[in-house]
Amino acid sequence: MRVLIGHSMAVLCLLLLAGSPALAQTQAQAPKPPTAVTWAPAHRFTDHGLEWVWSAPAQVFLARSEVMVSQYRACVQAGRCSPPKALDGDVRCNWRYPERGEHPVNCLDWSQATDFCEWAGGRLPSEQEWEAEASDRGRRRYPWGEEEVSCARAIQTEGRYGCGKDTTWPVCSRPAGNSVSGLCDLSGNVWEWVSGPEGPEKAVRGGALNFGGAEYLGATGRVTIPLESKDYDVGLRCARPAPP
């Protein structure tokens, strides 16, 4: 009889607890086990000398900066890339100037840009990926927000090319112009090659030292140029997919 009474009391206590608001709140707040890995913009790593940053808007890793001369030189030394154009007297092509190792590599065509990104374990970003990061999926007019473009945020034409220097600047010289994920120079310094449909021309994105205004330096700024172009105002940035 004592055992039956004890068992009945235990059942009653459990029933009362089940109806308790405190218990219900505790159950509601209990964390659910994750069903998949969730990547966040804080995820970053370094490989082949590039700092890769997770872009939540684009859902890919993007190189934090435009590819620098020093980084491209490593690919040439590895026998996987060919040197950019470097004409005597062409002061805007950075390759032949040792002091410009941290400037964006320029004066290279689409195939050379593709070769570098493949060597670095990635590829050129698509236009959709590039613009998703630059505009925060349509929420920003410029990579940094809505403030008008100026030399405080982008290396562009303001009086003279390159904010008065007539050349590119070292990458990440304008942190006030960084994008939502912390990428540098998505606006200005050099145009960036992107992937696209087969054809004699490809798009470049983001504007450059010799352009100004929202039409070119905004998050939707683009022009198309021949695949073989090796202009001083064109460089590259690489992308790579998330791990499986």
Image: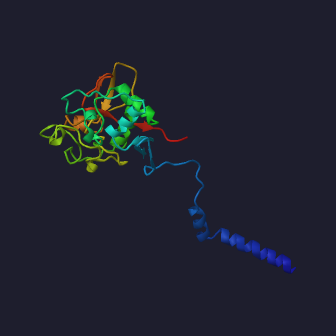
* Residue placed furthest toward the top: 200
Give the colouring mode of the picture. rainbow
- Judge by depth and name the residue closer to the eye, 195 or 141: 195
* Residue placed furthest toward the left: 159
Coordinates of residue 93 in the picture (x, y in percent): 24, 32
Q: Is 210 positioned to the left or the right of 179 in the image?
A: left
Coordinates of residue 134 in the picture (x, y in percent): 33, 41
Q: Is residue 68 visible?
A: no
Q: Quadrant of residue 202?
A: top left
Coordinates of residue 24 in the picture (x, y in percent): 60, 66
- Judge by depth and name the residue closer to the eye, 24 or 99: 99
* Residue placed furthest toward the bottom: 2
Taking the spot 32% from the left edge, 26% from the top edge, the residue there is 109
Q: Quadrant of residue 116?
A: top left
Coordinates of residue 70 in the picture (x, y in percent): 34, 39
Pick the quarter of the image with the C terminus: top right
- Judge by depth and name the residue closer to the eye, 113 or 198: 113
Pick the quarter of the image with the N terminus: bottom right
Q: Is residue 227 above or below residue 214?
A: above
Taking the spot 26% from the left edge, 50% from the top edge, the residue there is 176
Count the marks: 0
Taking the spot 21% from the left edge, 37% from the top edge, the residue there is 209
Q: Is residue 231 visible?
A: yes
